[in-house]
Image (tube, helix red, strand yellow):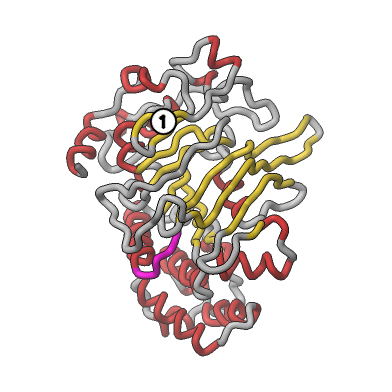
Amino acid sequence: MSTPSTHVNRSDTHESTTATSEDDVVLEVRDATVTFDMERGVSRVLDAVDMDVRRNEILAVVGESGSGKSMFASALLDAVTEPGELTGEVTYHPPEGDPYDVLSLSDRELMNYRWEEVAMVFQGAMRSFNPTLSIRTHFEETLEAHDAPEEAGIERARQLLSDLYLDPDRVLDSYPHELSGGMKQRALIALSLVLEPEVLVMDEPTAALDLLMQRSIIGLLDELQEKYGLTMIFITHDLPLVSELADRIAVLYAFEFVELGPTMDVITAATHPYTRALLKSTPNLDVPLEEMRPIEGSAPDPVAVPNGCSYHPRCPLADDQCLIEPPAFESVGEDHETACYHWEEAADALPFQAEIEAYAEEHQ
């Protein structure tokens, strides 16, 4: 599959506080592939993906469970666990100095990169904290491991917790079990930012929270991004959830990207049949349950991904061409690209609900 271009065009609903030039790339991913050797064959859970993440943007990476989202996040930090093997290139462009290859870093350099340049909030705040340590101790140990001044670091922690609408004294002196799920998740976000990274990667950070808390966290992340000029990569299966947060949406299917574009365009005028099916199948407050439609079939086995377009076994538009040759990315609008031979027919084959049209009118 060809490389999608990655020019940023912020949606009308989200304005950046920092100008982003066309070539201001913070993370450059080329041909990133993750494989696991198994008895029944090679399991390919990320398939030669290319992506440019641009400084100060919020990029949402969406797709069904098992589509490769978490592997993409792990690849950005060279954090694929053994026996998985990551190949390709991940290049980090610091705000000052020369870009460097993340996959060639030493263990110490990689530890610093993961916290001081690109930090990650993993799924499940419940499992991310040591239950025998206070929240303050988590911050202190992180600062000590990176030779960061403790006093200044704890002061930053207090500010971050306050930014996240938490009482710093109460949270820092608490043990994890004394905090609610939403409080733990916000404390974890503060911990990930205490060393002032440029990029924050979040892997399903709201998955275990109720809908109202999810939307609250989304709003807080928006505020943090604007205040600190962060680049954010938000990994989620819930496309509508990030519609108010993300500048761009990248859609993963079968371990590769199939559509990429500004949030408004992807939400209201998706061109890949999978993206449209994903929107029609995702629960949200605006679409009646009786109008939701599950995506027929199942995602492919990573050991036996179909030839041609990987979505063709589930696609109502698939023809002989789709079975033979994987489609290349092509432009379908300003800064909007898709990998589908029949993208012009997708809207008629998979029409959206009236609620999607209302969303578009509301955000014009």
Residue at horizontal 42 percent and vertical 27 percent from the top: 272
Q: Is residue 91 left or right of residue 268?
A: right
In this rendering, the count of numbered labels is: 1
Front residue of 91/178: it is 91
Q: Is residue 301 above or below residue 188?
A: above
User: Is 72 a magenta residue?
Assistant: no
- Range drawn in magenta: 227-231
Note whether 28 is above or below 56 in the view shown.
above
Is the residue 139 above or below the residue 149 in the image?
above
Secondary structure category for the residue under label 1: strand
* Residue 319 seen in render: yes
Does 87 sit left or right of 263 as displayed?
right
Residue 354: give x, y in percent of width and height.
22, 30
Q: Quadrant of the C terminus?
A: top left
Which is more toward the observer, 201 or 16?
A: 16
Does the rendering let one see residue 74? no
From the top left corner, tell me how far across and down residue 290 is, in percent: 30, 28
Question: How many residues crowd around disc 1 within 10 Å: few (fewer than 14), some, or many (20 or more)?
Answer: some
The reply, left or right, for residue 63 in relation to residue 108 is: left
Where is mark 1, residue-wise? 331
- The residue sitting at the bottom extreme is 151
Depth check: give the residue in front, 241 or 331: 331
Q: Amino acid at mark 1?
A: Ser
- The quarter of the displayed image where residue 119 is located: bottom right
Locate residue 15, reporting x and y percent.
Answer: 28, 56
Image point (21%, 44%), residue name: 363
Q: Quadrant of residue 87?
A: top right
Q: Residue furthest right?
A: 39
Residue at (23% x, 38% y) in the render: 360
* Residue under the point 36% across and 77% down: 162
